[in-house]
Amino acid sequence: MEVAKDIAERAVIEALKAGAKYADARLEKSTWETVVVKDGKVERVKSGKTKGLGLRVLLKTWGFASCTDLSKKSLQKTVAAAVNMGKSANRARKINLAKIPVKEDNVEVKSITDPFTISLEEKVKLCLDSDRCARVNKFIKRTTTYLACDKTEKFFISSEGAEIAFSNTVTYCETFALAKRGIVVEYMDEMAGGSGGFEIAENFDLPEKAKNVGQKASRLAAAKTIPEKKTTVVLDQDLVALLCHEIIGHPSEADRVLGREAAWAGKAWWAGMNGKRIGSKLLNATDDPRVKGALGYYEYDDEGTPARRKELIREGVLKEHMHSRETAAEFGVLPNGNMRAQSFQYLPLIRMSNTFIEPGDYDMEELFEINDGVYLKGQKIPSIDSKRHNFQISAKEAFLIKRGELTGPFRGASIVGVAPEFFKSVDAVGKDFEMRPVPNCGKGDPMQTIGVGNGGPHLRGVAQVVGVR
Protein backbone atom coordinates (compact mmCIF):
# COMPACT_ATOMS: atom_id res chain seq x y z
CA MET A 1 0.00 0.00 0.00
CA GLU A 2 2.57 2.55 -1.13
CA VAL A 3 -0.07 5.21 -1.88
CA ALA A 4 -1.51 4.64 1.59
CA LYS A 5 1.92 5.11 3.12
CA ASP A 6 2.36 8.51 1.49
CA ILE A 7 -1.09 9.72 2.58
CA ALA A 8 -0.71 8.48 6.16
CA GLU A 9 2.79 9.95 6.44
CA ARG A 10 1.52 13.32 5.24
CA ALA A 11 -1.28 13.35 7.84
CA VAL A 12 1.11 12.54 10.69
CA ILE A 13 3.71 15.12 9.60
CA GLU A 14 1.07 17.86 9.29
CA ALA A 15 -0.29 17.01 12.75
CA LEU A 16 3.17 17.35 14.30
CA LYS A 17 3.69 20.68 12.54
CA ALA A 18 0.38 21.86 14.04
CA GLY A 19 1.60 21.15 17.56
CA ALA A 20 0.75 17.49 18.28
CA LYS A 21 3.12 15.74 20.71
CA TYR A 22 2.20 12.41 19.16
CA ALA A 23 0.17 11.34 16.13
CA ASP A 24 -0.86 8.13 14.41
CA ALA A 25 -2.87 7.43 11.26
CA ARG A 26 -4.87 4.36 10.21
CA LEU A 27 -5.77 4.03 6.57
CA GLU A 28 -8.18 1.22 5.70
CA LYS A 29 -9.76 -0.27 2.61
CA SER A 30 -12.60 -2.75 3.03
CA THR A 31 -14.66 -4.85 0.61
CA TRP A 32 -17.76 -6.56 1.97
CA GLU A 33 -20.88 -8.57 1.12
CA THR A 34 -23.90 -9.64 3.18
CA VAL A 35 -26.82 -11.91 2.35
CA VAL A 36 -29.90 -12.19 4.59
CA VAL A 37 -32.77 -14.60 3.91
CA LYS A 38 -35.87 -14.51 6.16
CA ASP A 39 -38.83 -16.85 6.07
CA GLY A 40 -37.84 -18.25 2.69
CA LYS A 41 -37.39 -14.87 1.00
CA VAL A 42 -34.34 -12.79 0.26
CA GLU A 43 -34.53 -9.80 2.58
CA ARG A 44 -31.20 -8.15 1.84
CA VAL A 45 -28.23 -8.55 -0.49
CA LYS A 46 -25.62 -5.86 -0.09
CA SER A 47 -22.06 -5.34 -1.17
CA GLY A 48 -19.75 -2.39 -1.07
CA LYS A 49 -16.34 -0.88 -0.62
CA THR A 50 -15.15 1.68 1.90
CA LYS A 51 -11.85 3.51 2.17
CA GLY A 52 -10.65 6.22 4.47
CA LEU A 53 -8.22 7.50 7.07
CA GLY A 54 -8.49 8.03 10.82
CA LEU A 55 -6.05 10.43 12.50
CA ARG A 56 -5.38 10.47 16.25
CA VAL A 57 -3.32 13.22 17.86
CA LEU A 58 -2.22 14.01 21.40
CA LEU A 59 -2.04 17.62 22.64
CA LYS A 60 -3.77 18.63 25.87
CA THR A 61 -5.99 15.63 25.32
CA TRP A 62 -6.72 13.19 22.52
CA GLY A 63 -8.05 14.59 19.26
CA PHE A 64 -9.48 12.45 16.47
CA ALA A 65 -10.93 12.97 13.00
CA SER A 66 -11.49 10.82 9.93
CA CYS A 67 -12.15 11.28 6.23
CA THR A 68 -13.10 9.25 3.17
CA ASP A 69 -11.85 11.89 0.73
CA LEU A 70 -8.07 11.46 0.63
CA SER A 71 -7.31 14.59 -1.39
CA LYS A 72 -4.79 17.11 -0.06
CA LYS A 73 -7.50 19.64 0.84
CA SER A 74 -9.59 17.06 2.70
CA LEU A 75 -6.54 15.77 4.55
CA GLN A 76 -5.71 19.30 5.72
CA LYS A 77 -9.24 19.70 7.11
CA THR A 78 -8.97 16.35 8.89
CA VAL A 79 -5.66 17.31 10.50
CA ALA A 80 -7.06 20.67 11.59
CA ALA A 81 -10.18 19.05 13.10
CA ALA A 82 -8.16 16.49 15.06
CA VAL A 83 -5.66 19.10 16.32
CA ASN A 84 -8.41 21.53 17.37
CA MET A 85 -10.12 18.77 19.31
CA GLY A 86 -6.83 17.91 21.03
CA LYS A 87 -6.40 21.55 22.10
CA SER A 88 -9.93 21.91 23.40
CA ALA A 89 -9.64 20.56 26.94
CA ASN A 90 -9.35 23.11 29.76
CA ARG A 91 -8.74 20.69 32.63
CA ALA A 92 -7.51 17.57 30.92
CA ARG A 93 -5.75 14.91 32.95
CA LYS A 94 -2.11 14.41 32.03
CA ILE A 95 -1.78 11.64 29.47
CA ASN A 96 1.37 9.55 29.32
CA LEU A 97 2.03 6.75 26.85
CA ALA A 98 3.93 3.66 27.95
CA LYS A 99 6.73 2.75 25.57
CA ILE A 100 6.27 0.00 23.00
CA PRO A 101 8.61 -1.63 20.48
CA VAL A 102 8.41 0.46 17.30
CA LYS A 103 7.75 -2.03 14.50
CA GLU A 104 7.80 -2.15 10.73
CA ASP A 105 5.86 -5.20 9.57
CA ASN A 106 3.52 -6.59 6.94
CA VAL A 107 1.02 -9.21 8.12
CA GLU A 108 -1.09 -10.93 5.47
CA VAL A 109 -3.59 -13.60 6.48
CA LYS A 110 -4.12 -16.19 3.76
CA SER A 111 -7.51 -17.82 3.24
CA ILE A 112 -8.11 -21.14 1.47
CA THR A 113 -11.04 -19.87 -0.61
CA ASP A 114 -11.37 -16.17 -1.29
CA PRO A 115 -15.09 -15.50 -0.56
CA PHE A 116 -15.20 -12.92 -3.34
CA THR A 117 -14.48 -15.63 -5.91
CA ILE A 118 -17.87 -17.12 -4.97
CA SER A 119 -20.64 -15.31 -6.81
CA LEU A 120 -23.42 -13.53 -4.96
CA GLU A 121 -25.87 -15.83 -6.79
CA GLU A 122 -24.23 -18.88 -5.22
CA LYS A 123 -24.29 -17.28 -1.78
CA VAL A 124 -27.96 -16.37 -2.12
CA LYS A 125 -28.79 -19.92 -3.25
CA LEU A 126 -26.92 -21.36 -0.26
CA CYS A 127 -28.87 -19.14 2.12
CA LEU A 128 -32.23 -19.92 0.46
CA ASP A 129 -31.54 -23.66 0.53
CA SER A 130 -30.46 -23.49 4.18
CA ASP A 131 -33.45 -21.41 5.21
CA ARG A 132 -35.72 -23.98 3.58
CA CYS A 133 -34.02 -26.76 5.54
CA ALA A 134 -34.82 -24.99 8.82
CA ARG A 135 -38.57 -25.14 8.16
CA VAL A 136 -38.87 -28.75 9.34
CA ASN A 137 -42.56 -28.67 10.30
CA LYS A 138 -45.62 -26.47 10.80
CA PHE A 139 -44.41 -25.25 14.21
CA ILE A 140 -41.53 -23.26 12.71
CA LYS A 141 -42.80 -19.69 12.34
CA ARG A 142 -39.63 -17.71 11.66
CA THR A 143 -36.34 -18.56 10.00
CA THR A 144 -33.26 -16.52 9.16
CA THR A 145 -30.03 -17.37 7.40
CA TYR A 146 -27.18 -14.87 7.35
CA LEU A 147 -23.87 -14.84 5.49
CA ALA A 148 -21.23 -12.08 5.58
CA CYS A 149 -17.75 -11.71 4.11
CA ASP A 150 -15.27 -8.88 4.61
CA LYS A 151 -11.77 -8.31 3.26
CA THR A 152 -9.83 -5.49 4.91
CA GLU A 153 -6.43 -3.92 4.27
CA LYS A 154 -5.06 -1.64 6.99
CA PHE A 155 -1.99 0.53 7.18
CA PHE A 156 -0.83 2.07 10.48
CA ILE A 157 1.85 4.71 10.85
CA SER A 158 2.92 6.68 13.94
CA SER A 159 5.10 9.68 14.68
CA GLU A 160 7.39 7.30 16.57
CA GLY A 161 8.26 5.49 13.33
CA ALA A 162 5.91 2.48 13.32
CA GLU A 163 4.74 1.24 9.90
CA ILE A 164 2.46 -1.79 9.97
CA ALA A 165 0.35 -3.28 7.16
CA PHE A 166 -2.33 -5.86 7.91
CA SER A 167 -4.68 -7.63 5.51
CA ASN A 168 -7.30 -10.14 6.60
CA THR A 169 -10.50 -11.81 5.44
CA VAL A 170 -13.39 -12.58 7.77
CA THR A 171 -16.33 -14.89 7.03
CA TYR A 172 -19.39 -15.32 9.25
CA CYS A 173 -22.61 -17.32 8.86
CA GLU A 174 -25.61 -18.02 11.06
CA THR A 175 -28.88 -19.94 10.93
CA PHE A 176 -31.91 -19.26 13.16
CA ALA A 177 -35.32 -20.88 13.67
CA LEU A 178 -38.22 -19.89 15.93
CA ALA A 179 -40.94 -22.36 16.85
CA LYS A 180 -44.39 -21.74 18.36
CA ARG A 181 -46.60 -24.34 20.01
CA GLY A 182 -49.68 -22.82 21.57
CA ILE A 183 -48.47 -19.81 23.55
CA VAL A 184 -44.92 -21.13 23.91
CA VAL A 185 -42.26 -19.58 21.68
CA GLU A 186 -38.66 -20.86 21.59
CA TYR A 187 -35.77 -20.40 19.22
CA MET A 188 -32.45 -22.00 18.36
CA ASP A 189 -29.49 -20.77 16.35
CA GLU A 190 -26.01 -21.86 15.36
CA MET A 191 -23.16 -19.82 13.92
CA ALA A 192 -19.62 -20.02 12.65
CA GLY A 193 -17.11 -17.33 11.86
CA GLY A 194 -13.54 -16.28 12.03
CA SER A 195 -10.45 -15.07 10.29
CA GLY A 196 -10.56 -16.98 7.01
CA GLY A 197 -12.29 -17.40 3.68
CA PHE A 198 -15.37 -19.15 2.36
CA GLU A 199 -14.05 -22.46 3.66
CA ILE A 200 -15.56 -21.43 7.03
CA ALA A 201 -19.08 -21.50 5.56
CA GLU A 202 -18.37 -24.69 3.59
CA ASN A 203 -17.05 -26.55 6.65
CA PHE A 204 -19.97 -25.34 8.76
CA ASP A 205 -22.53 -26.96 6.39
CA LEU A 206 -25.31 -24.35 6.64
CA PRO A 207 -28.13 -26.57 5.28
CA GLU A 208 -27.45 -29.31 7.81
CA LYS A 209 -27.09 -26.85 10.69
CA ALA A 210 -30.33 -25.13 9.63
CA LYS A 211 -32.17 -28.45 9.75
CA ASN A 212 -30.77 -29.10 13.23
CA VAL A 213 -31.87 -25.73 14.63
CA GLY A 214 -35.36 -26.22 13.20
CA GLN A 215 -35.69 -29.63 14.83
CA LYS A 216 -34.31 -28.41 18.17
CA ALA A 217 -36.52 -25.30 18.27
CA SER A 218 -39.62 -27.37 17.50
CA ARG A 219 -38.76 -29.92 20.18
CA LEU A 220 -37.95 -27.27 22.75
CA ALA A 221 -41.25 -25.41 22.24
CA ALA A 222 -43.00 -28.60 23.40
CA ALA A 223 -40.79 -29.03 26.47
CA LYS A 224 -41.63 -28.40 30.12
CA THR A 225 -40.04 -25.66 32.23
CA ILE A 226 -37.14 -26.45 34.53
CA PRO A 227 -37.68 -26.84 38.31
CA GLU A 228 -36.11 -23.98 40.25
CA LYS A 229 -33.36 -24.69 42.78
CA LYS A 230 -29.80 -23.87 43.83
CA THR A 231 -27.75 -26.78 42.60
CA THR A 232 -24.66 -28.05 40.87
CA VAL A 233 -24.67 -26.92 37.26
CA VAL A 234 -22.72 -28.10 34.23
CA LEU A 235 -22.40 -25.45 31.49
CA ASP A 236 -21.59 -26.28 27.87
CA GLN A 237 -18.97 -24.44 25.79
CA ASP A 238 -21.50 -22.04 24.29
CA LEU A 239 -22.77 -20.85 27.66
CA VAL A 240 -19.23 -20.70 29.05
CA ALA A 241 -18.29 -18.47 26.08
CA LEU A 242 -21.03 -15.98 27.02
CA LEU A 243 -20.12 -16.12 30.71
CA CYS A 244 -16.48 -15.50 29.81
CA HIS A 245 -17.41 -12.56 27.57
CA GLU A 246 -19.62 -10.80 30.11
CA ILE A 247 -18.05 -11.67 33.49
CA ILE A 248 -14.35 -11.96 32.57
CA GLY A 249 -13.72 -10.16 29.26
CA HIS A 250 -15.45 -6.83 29.85
CA PRO A 251 -14.36 -6.26 33.47
CA SER A 252 -10.76 -7.00 32.38
CA GLU A 253 -10.70 -3.86 30.20
CA ALA A 254 -8.55 -1.33 32.08
CA ASP A 255 -10.73 1.69 31.26
CA ARG A 256 -13.63 -0.09 33.00
CA VAL A 257 -11.38 -0.93 35.95
CA LEU A 258 -10.53 2.79 36.21
CA GLY A 259 -14.23 3.71 36.12
CA ARG A 260 -14.04 5.62 32.83
CA GLU A 261 -16.79 3.60 31.19
CA ALA A 262 -19.18 4.01 34.13
CA ALA A 263 -21.62 6.17 32.17
CA TRP A 264 -22.16 3.25 29.78
CA ALA A 265 -22.65 0.52 32.43
CA GLY A 266 -18.95 -0.21 32.18
CA LYS A 267 -17.49 -0.86 35.63
CA ALA A 268 -15.52 -3.80 37.01
CA TRP A 269 -16.17 -5.47 40.37
CA TRP A 270 -12.54 -6.53 40.60
CA ALA A 271 -11.07 -3.00 40.48
CA GLY A 272 -8.08 -2.89 42.84
CA MET A 273 -8.03 -6.67 43.27
CA ASN A 274 -4.96 -7.62 41.23
CA GLY A 275 -3.15 -10.49 42.95
CA LYS A 276 -6.24 -11.51 44.91
CA ARG A 277 -8.20 -14.76 44.64
CA ILE A 278 -11.50 -14.41 42.79
CA GLY A 279 -12.14 -18.06 41.85
CA SER A 280 -11.18 -21.66 42.46
CA LYS A 281 -7.71 -22.96 41.57
CA LEU A 282 -9.24 -24.66 38.53
CA LEU A 283 -10.18 -21.33 36.93
CA ASN A 284 -7.75 -20.02 34.31
CA ALA A 285 -8.76 -17.29 31.84
CA THR A 286 -6.79 -15.84 28.95
CA ASP A 287 -7.04 -13.15 26.29
CA ASP A 288 -4.99 -13.91 23.18
CA PRO A 289 -5.29 -11.95 19.89
CA ARG A 290 -2.92 -14.34 18.15
CA VAL A 291 -5.27 -17.34 18.04
CA LYS A 292 -5.17 -18.01 14.31
CA GLY A 293 -8.54 -18.47 12.66
CA ALA A 294 -10.49 -16.86 15.51
CA LEU A 295 -12.70 -13.83 14.91
CA GLY A 296 -10.59 -11.63 17.19
CA TYR A 297 -7.28 -12.45 15.49
CA TYR A 298 -4.60 -9.76 14.93
CA GLU A 299 -0.83 -9.34 15.38
CA TYR A 300 -0.83 -5.61 16.24
CA ASP A 301 -3.53 -3.48 17.79
CA ASP A 302 -4.62 -0.06 16.51
CA GLU A 303 -1.85 1.69 18.46
CA GLY A 304 0.82 -0.45 16.81
CA THR A 305 1.39 -2.45 20.00
CA PRO A 306 2.45 -6.05 19.32
CA ALA A 307 -0.33 -8.44 20.36
CA ARG A 308 0.42 -10.96 23.08
CA ARG A 309 -1.22 -13.55 25.27
CA LYS A 310 -2.52 -12.22 28.60
CA GLU A 311 -3.14 -14.35 31.67
CA LEU A 312 -6.22 -12.61 33.09
CA ILE A 313 -6.87 -15.19 35.79
CA ARG A 314 -4.40 -17.88 36.80
CA GLU A 315 -5.43 -20.61 39.25
CA GLY A 316 -8.24 -18.40 40.48
CA VAL A 317 -6.04 -15.34 41.09
CA LEU A 318 -6.60 -12.09 39.18
CA LYS A 319 -3.37 -11.38 37.30
CA GLU A 320 -3.69 -8.94 34.42
CA HIS A 321 -5.94 -6.41 32.68
CA MET A 322 -6.26 -5.48 29.01
CA HIS A 323 -4.46 -2.21 28.36
CA SER A 324 -3.91 0.72 26.05
CA ARG A 325 -0.60 2.56 26.14
CA GLU A 326 -2.26 5.21 28.28
CA THR A 327 -3.72 2.86 30.92
CA ALA A 328 -0.54 0.77 30.97
CA ALA A 329 1.37 3.91 31.96
CA GLU A 330 -1.14 4.60 34.74
CA PHE A 331 -0.86 1.05 36.09
CA GLY A 332 2.91 0.98 35.66
CA VAL A 333 2.84 -2.09 33.43
CA LEU A 334 3.74 -2.91 29.84
CA PRO A 335 1.11 -2.32 27.13
CA ASN A 336 -0.38 -5.62 25.96
CA GLY A 337 -2.13 -4.80 22.70
CA ASN A 338 -5.88 -4.42 23.24
CA MET A 339 -6.70 -1.06 21.60
CA ARG A 340 -9.04 -1.57 18.64
CA ALA A 341 -11.51 0.43 16.59
CA GLN A 342 -14.48 -0.74 14.54
CA SER A 343 -12.96 1.04 11.53
CA PHE A 344 -10.90 4.08 10.54
CA GLN A 345 -13.95 6.23 11.39
CA TYR A 346 -13.61 5.58 15.13
CA LEU A 347 -11.15 6.30 17.92
CA PRO A 348 -9.65 3.03 19.28
CA LEU A 349 -10.93 1.69 22.60
CA ILE A 350 -9.68 -1.04 24.93
CA ARG A 351 -11.38 -4.21 23.67
CA MET A 352 -11.09 -7.92 24.31
CA SER A 353 -9.76 -10.03 21.42
CA ASN A 354 -10.12 -13.80 21.89
CA THR A 355 -11.03 -14.27 25.54
CA PHE A 356 -11.56 -17.74 26.92
CA ILE A 357 -11.44 -20.09 29.88
CA GLU A 358 -8.59 -22.56 29.54
CA PRO A 359 -9.39 -26.30 29.27
CA GLY A 360 -8.94 -28.55 32.32
CA ASP A 361 -8.46 -32.27 32.92
CA TYR A 362 -12.03 -33.64 33.12
CA ASP A 363 -13.66 -35.94 30.57
CA MET A 364 -17.34 -35.34 29.77
CA GLU A 365 -18.39 -38.46 31.71
CA GLU A 366 -16.60 -37.24 34.83
CA LEU A 367 -18.38 -33.87 34.74
CA PHE A 368 -21.75 -35.63 35.05
CA GLU A 369 -20.70 -37.96 37.88
CA ILE A 370 -22.93 -36.20 40.42
CA ASN A 371 -26.08 -37.29 42.24
CA ASP A 372 -28.14 -34.24 41.37
CA GLY A 373 -27.74 -31.19 39.15
CA VAL A 374 -28.68 -29.37 35.95
CA TYR A 375 -26.92 -29.35 32.57
CA LEU A 376 -27.41 -26.08 30.65
CA LYS A 377 -26.69 -25.73 26.93
CA GLY A 378 -26.57 -22.79 24.54
CA GLN A 379 -26.49 -19.07 25.21
CA LYS A 380 -29.46 -16.73 25.04
CA ILE A 381 -29.79 -13.42 26.89
CA PRO A 382 -27.47 -12.09 29.62
CA SER A 383 -28.51 -9.64 32.32
CA ILE A 384 -25.51 -8.19 34.16
CA ASP A 385 -25.16 -5.34 36.65
CA SER A 386 -22.84 -2.43 35.82
CA LYS A 387 -19.92 -3.92 37.77
CA ARG A 388 -20.35 -7.37 36.16
CA HIS A 389 -20.82 -8.72 39.70
CA ASN A 390 -24.38 -10.09 39.72
CA PHE A 391 -25.61 -11.96 36.68
CA GLN A 392 -28.51 -13.87 35.20
CA ILE A 393 -27.82 -15.71 31.96
CA SER A 394 -30.44 -17.73 30.12
CA ALA A 395 -29.71 -20.98 28.33
CA LYS A 396 -31.42 -22.40 25.27
CA GLU A 397 -32.10 -25.77 26.87
CA ALA A 398 -31.53 -27.63 30.14
CA PHE A 399 -31.40 -31.22 31.35
CA LEU A 400 -31.76 -32.65 34.84
CA ILE A 401 -28.80 -34.74 36.02
CA LYS A 402 -29.57 -37.73 38.27
CA ARG A 403 -26.63 -39.98 39.14
CA GLY A 404 -24.94 -39.24 35.85
CA GLU A 405 -28.06 -39.68 33.69
CA LEU A 406 -29.72 -36.82 31.75
CA THR A 407 -33.46 -36.12 31.51
CA GLY A 408 -34.88 -33.44 29.21
CA PRO A 409 -34.74 -31.12 27.47
CA PHE A 410 -36.42 -28.43 29.56
CA ARG A 411 -36.96 -24.88 28.34
CA GLY A 412 -36.74 -21.41 29.86
CA ALA A 413 -33.79 -22.06 32.16
CA SER A 414 -31.44 -19.40 33.51
CA ILE A 415 -28.59 -19.39 35.99
CA VAL A 416 -28.41 -16.64 38.59
CA GLY A 417 -25.27 -15.95 40.55
CA VAL A 418 -22.70 -13.62 42.04
CA ALA A 419 -19.48 -13.70 40.04
CA PRO A 420 -16.93 -14.42 42.83
CA GLU A 421 -19.22 -16.98 44.48
CA PHE A 422 -19.77 -18.83 41.22
CA PHE A 423 -16.10 -18.73 40.22
CA LYS A 424 -15.05 -20.07 43.63
CA SER A 425 -17.57 -22.91 43.31
CA VAL A 426 -15.99 -24.27 40.12
CA ASP A 427 -14.87 -27.82 40.91
CA ALA A 428 -14.41 -29.36 37.44
CA VAL A 429 -13.25 -28.02 34.07
CA GLY A 430 -13.48 -30.13 30.93
CA LYS A 431 -10.91 -30.91 28.25
CA ASP A 432 -13.27 -30.15 25.35
CA PHE A 433 -12.34 -26.56 24.50
CA GLU A 434 -14.25 -24.71 21.75
CA MET A 435 -14.15 -21.11 20.49
CA ARG A 436 -17.27 -19.14 19.52
CA PRO A 437 -17.47 -16.10 17.21
CA VAL A 438 -19.07 -12.91 18.52
CA PRO A 439 -19.45 -10.51 15.56
CA ASN A 440 -21.13 -7.65 17.40
CA CYS A 441 -19.49 -6.92 20.75
CA GLY A 442 -20.51 -3.36 21.56
CA LYS A 443 -18.79 -0.62 23.54
CA GLY A 444 -18.32 3.14 23.58
CA ASP A 445 -20.19 6.31 22.68
CA PRO A 446 -20.72 6.43 19.78
CA MET A 447 -21.24 2.69 19.95
CA GLN A 448 -18.64 0.56 18.20
CA THR A 449 -19.30 -3.08 17.33
CA ILE A 450 -16.35 -5.35 16.76
CA GLY A 451 -15.66 -9.06 16.23
CA VAL A 452 -14.22 -11.08 19.11
CA GLY A 453 -13.77 -14.72 19.97
CA ASN A 454 -14.95 -16.29 23.23
CA GLY A 455 -14.83 -19.84 24.40
CA GLY A 456 -13.94 -22.50 26.87
CA PRO A 457 -14.70 -26.10 27.77
CA HIS A 458 -17.57 -27.62 29.73
CA LEU A 459 -17.44 -26.33 33.31
CA ARG A 460 -19.07 -27.33 36.61
CA GLY A 461 -20.01 -25.09 39.54
CA VAL A 462 -22.93 -24.10 41.78
CA ALA A 463 -25.66 -21.59 40.89
CA GLN A 464 -29.34 -20.83 41.32
CA VAL A 465 -31.35 -22.26 38.42
CA VAL A 466 -34.59 -20.44 37.62
CA GLY A 467 -37.21 -21.09 34.97
CA VAL A 468 -40.03 -19.34 33.16
CA ARG A 469 -42.97 -18.76 35.47
Image (spheres, rainbow, N blue to C red):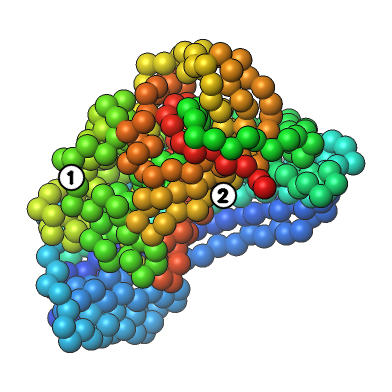
Q: SS at mark 2?
A: strand
Identify the residue at the far right of this view: 138
Specify the quadrant of the image occupied by residue 192. Answer: top right
> Label 2: few (<14), some or many (≥20) within 10 Å?
few
Tell which of 61 and 149 is nearer to you: 61
Foreground of the two, 375 or 147 = 375
Residue visible at 61% across and 50% down in the picture: 148
> Which structural element holds mark 1?
loop
Is 270 or 129 nearer to us in this picture? 270
Note whether 90 is above or below 219 in the view shown. below
Q: Is 15 on the left or on the right of 114, as rendered?
A: left
Residue 73 sits in quarter: bottom left
Q: Which mark is residue 274?
A: 1
Binning the other alpha carbons within 10 Å of mark 1 as few (below 14), some (14 to 19) or many (20 upward) gives some
Residue 125 appears anywhere in the view: no
Residue at figure coordinates x 73%, y 59% from the top left:
44
Numbered badge on residue 381: 2
Q: How many marks?
A: 2
The x and y percentages for residue 318 are 23, 40
Residue 334 pos. (x, y %)? 14, 48
Q: Residue at x 41, y 16 (%)?
A: 362
Whole-percent x and y of residue 268? 30, 54
Distance between the alpha carbons at the discs numbered 2 and 1:
29 Å
